[in-house]
Image (spheres, rainbow, N blue to C red):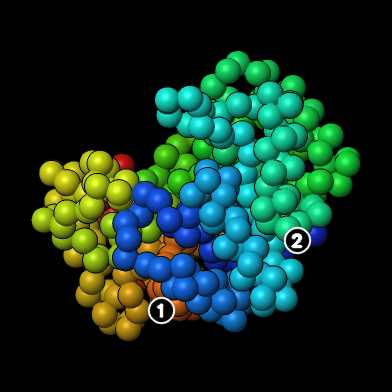
Amino acid sequence: MEYRELPGTNIRLSVIGFGCWAAGGQHWGNDASQDDFRAAISQALALGINWFDTAPLYGHGQADTLLADVLRTEHSDAFVVTKVGVRNAEGSRPVSDLSPAHIVSDTEASLKRLRLETIPLLLVHWPCDFGTPICESMTALESLKLSGKIRHYGVCNYPPVLLEQVLQCGNPVALQTPYSMIRREFEQQLRDVCMPKGADGWPRQKIGVLAYETLCRGLLTGKYGPDHRFGANDLRAHDGRFSGDWARKNLTFVDSLRPIANKLNVSLAALAVGWVCQMPGVTAALVGVKRPEQIRECVKSINLISFTELWHAIDRRIRRYASP
């Protein structure tokens, strides 16, 4: 396993992290059991993965509870990343409440579910829906840090202009953001905020970047053809990337990668994760898996990171086929 330092800390994260959203039992179909997830987490630990990403929203805390149980059984002190802010409003979609009171209560509830005294890294899940000033929210996070309830904090899903405000108001160490071969908004402005150029003209990493959706919700694994139908309890049933012209274009790109993967004797998933891991600015990449064999395949990407010519060849295919 390869490890990289999270900027602004003395923590070294495995270049691949384990995403626990599907372990919450909602939104990702019914094709995996709790035992599958437990085995996958144990396998990840055995392979050297040392950080796991969860959130209160994932199964209303079910993912937290499962993760805590496995880590306790394995006697592991793995680095847990969880989130804060999102709550379910009455009869409505989940909303982000970043008032200081909710930040504190949400964090304390996570500590109980995860059976932790201190959360290693707490991320604001989404920008605020209620107009709480960013500096007010950052002050609440700093207070949690001073009290020992969290060690570090950061944000998820923040656009460049809001991330700049966060950096002015607080001391975040990580941004979690979507990034994959076919979802590359990070390259447009966010990367410049995360690693601005210094006086010498060279970029300097200002905040760690934890990429998610590295497999584009499974599309980049090559498992799902244009005629695949997801169940009603699977969020991909309503994701336009899996249907119509958009899907056909993306799947043509995925098919163009198959000869490369076959030649290297790796999965398409390994290619997709490896591509993200070698991109400038990325500290580590999250993968969402359900079974031990899936995490084993993703970890094979580590051996590909230094293959410069491989990534040049794939970038040519991205320019030809993939969505911007």
Residue drawn at 37 percent across, 49 percent down = 27
State the image coordinates of residue 60 (x, y, percent, origin top left).
52, 46
Q: Name above or below for residue 316 compared with residue 295.
A: above
Per the image, the residue denoted by label 1 is 293
Q: Is residue 16 left or right of residue 255?
A: right
What is the quadrant of the C terminus in the image? Answer: top left
Query: Mark 1 and mark 2 in contact (Cβ < 8 Å)?
Result: no
Per the image, the residue denoted by label 2 is 11
Q: Is residue 45 left or right of residue 241?
A: right
Q: Name above or below for residue 4 compared with residue 292.
A: above
Q: Is residue 132 visible?
A: yes
Residue drawn at 68 percent across, 47 percent down = 110
Residue drawn at 88 percent across, 40 percent down = 146
State the image coordinates of residue 10 (x, y, percent, origin top left).
80, 59
Kind of residue indicated by mark 2? Ile
Q: Name above or below for residue 101 compared with residue 238.
A: above
Q: Camera-side residue: 123 or 209?
A: 123
Q: Name above or below for residue 191 compared with residue 295.
A: above
Residue drawn at 22 percent across, 75 percent down = 259
N-terminal label among 2 and 1: 2
State the image coordinates of residue 218 (x, y, percent, origin top left).
32, 59
Q: Camera-side residue: 260 or 150?
A: 150
User: Could you tell me how many numbered marks the image carries?
Assistant: 2
> To which quarter of the image does residue 141 belong?
top right
Secondary structure of the residue carrying tag 1 is helix
> To which quarter of the image does residue 191 belong?
top right
Specify few, some or many for label 1: CA neighbours under 10 Å numbering under 14, 14-19, or 20 or more: few
Give me the C-alpha separation between circle 2 and circle 1.
Answer: 28 Å
Q: Is residue 158 left or right of residue 34?
A: right
State the image coordinates of residue 1 (x, y, percent, origin top left).
59, 77
Kind of residue indicated by mark 1? Glu
Secondary structure of the residue carrying tag 2 is loop
